Image (tube, rainbow, N blue to C red):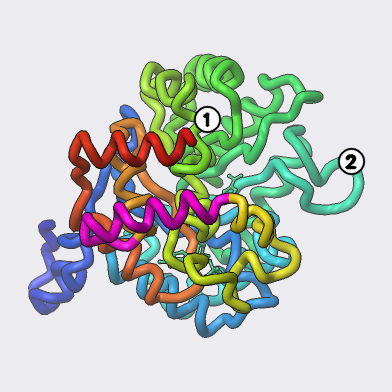
Amino acid sequence: MHINDKTKSEEEKSGHGRYDSMTYNRCGKSGVLLPAISLGLWHNFGSVDNIDNARDILKCAFDLGIVHFDLANNYGPPYGSAEKNFGKIFKKDFKSLRDELFIASKAGYDMWPGPYGNYGSRKYLTASIDQSLKRMKLDYVDIFYHHRPDPNTALEETMVALSDIVRKGKALYVGISNYQPKETTEAASILQELKVPFILHQARYSMFDRWVENELLDTLHKNGVGCIAFSPLAQGMLTDKYLNGIPDDSRAAKNFTYLDKQQVSINLEKIQKLATIANQRDQKLSQMAIAWLLKRSEVTSVLIGASSPKQLKENVASLNNLDFSKDELTLIRKILEN
Ligand SMILES: NC(=O)c1ccc[n+]([C@@H]2O[C@H](COP(=O)([O-])OP(=O)(O)OC[C@H]3O[C@@H](n4cnc5c(N)ncnc54)[C@H](OP(=O)(O)O)[C@@H]3O)[C@@H](O)[C@H]2O)c1
């Protein structure tokens, strides 16, 4: 990287080495590069959480070269509080680094009461981006997503609303999330007509949830759109965390999360078998689960969550071994299909 500032030390110029250790992938056919691993703020950043820990996680992520942070209007709990906490941390630690960051927000799920705080109307999206920018203390987000399809609003209304958000300078790029292949093709065609840079689809994708492989990844490839895979560790199940029971401080043990103890016990046998293969590869299960997703060229970035800097460091080390032998892939497939 070339920085024309002779007053800075070599270390400062090079970004403390953070850009050397991370891999950056091109996002579809766009000009944007995203880190192979991005950080999501769905959990661990709300006002119920410890903000010092949240700050440590964000700083650690940035130092590892994770320059993409993913938020949404309703992350918390309570809704809005992850964006608020991010705003506080941003002001303290990241304000001068704004141009080195790629920040996302979304609207589409339940956010505020009444008919205008949910789904995909122009009314909802237009108000929501303004609220998000205020909470995060930002002038613009790098990407703004429609968070889920709305069966009762014309797709054109939602896409024009996204386009106008870009025209007003409140977002640079747009994305969609949780859209099926057919809806994705329709959205891509409207956005192309509007000349809006549609660069990312955010989809749940992990060893335990492979729905995107049926058609969506092909659709994205055809449209020059990248895929960012969310919940790549199946919310923590694809780590060593649950191998010996359910720790008290884990997501599965907590109330108000989308992972329960029953899901863990249903999957435990598979988790144990996968952990054995990871071990033979000299990797943690989390590292193998991330590497397994990154072998698909359509996957621009793997969007992880983390409740500590230690988890982040462990997960980023997955980049040290992204190769799989044919035998390993066959063994993994058999375990997943059983
Ligand atoms: N677009 C959408 O509809 C949508 C939906 C969901 C998520 N997302 C995005 O995707 C992001 C990631 O989702 P996710 O949090 O479900 O992802 P995930 O990476 O599958 O799960 C993250 C959780 O796994 C555990 N974990 C991570 N690394 C670990 C390690 N090395 N060892 C042990 N445990 C580890 C931690 O849980 P513990 O608390 O148990 O430690 C952590 O919070 C979200 O923050 C959000 O930005 C988007």
Residue 189 percent coordinates (x, y): 52, 15
Is the stretch drawn in magenta largely helix, strand or loop? helix
- 202 magenta-colored: no
Q: Quadrant of residue 190?
A: top right
Near-viewer residue (330 or 323): 330
Q: Earlier in the sequence, mark 2 or mark 1?
A: 2
What's the mark number on residue 294?
none
Near-viewer residue (151 or 134): 151
Near-viewer residue (295 or 131): 295
Residue 48 percent coordinates (x, y): 69, 77
Q: What residue is disc 2 on?
A: 115
- 268 magenta-colored: yes
Q: Does any atom of ligand 1 lie closer than 8 Å to the CB of label 1?
A: no
Boundaries of the magenta span: 267-284
Looking at numbered disc 2 in the image, what kind of residue is underneath it? Pro
Q: Quadrant of residue 67?
A: bottom left
Asked if residue 324 lies left or right of residue 270, the reply is left
Residue 301 percent coordinates (x, y): 37, 45
Q: Residues within 10 Å of mark 2 (few under 14, many from 20)?
A: few
Note whether residue 67 is visible.
no
Residue 218 percent coordinates (x, y): 40, 20
Residue at left offset 58%, top offset 64%:
136
Q: Is residue 318 above or below residue 86?
A: above
Asked if residue 214 lies left or right of residue 159, the reply is left
| SS assignment at label 2 | loop
Q: What residue is disc 1 on?
A: 211
Q: Residues within 10 Å of mark 1 (few under 14, many from 20)?
A: some
Spatial separation of the CA atoms under disc 2 and disc 1? 31 Å
Looking at numbered disc 1 in the image, what kind of residue is underneath it? Trp
Residue at left offset 32%, top offset 62%:
284
| SS assignment at label 1 | helix
Residue at left offset 30%, top offset 55%:
278
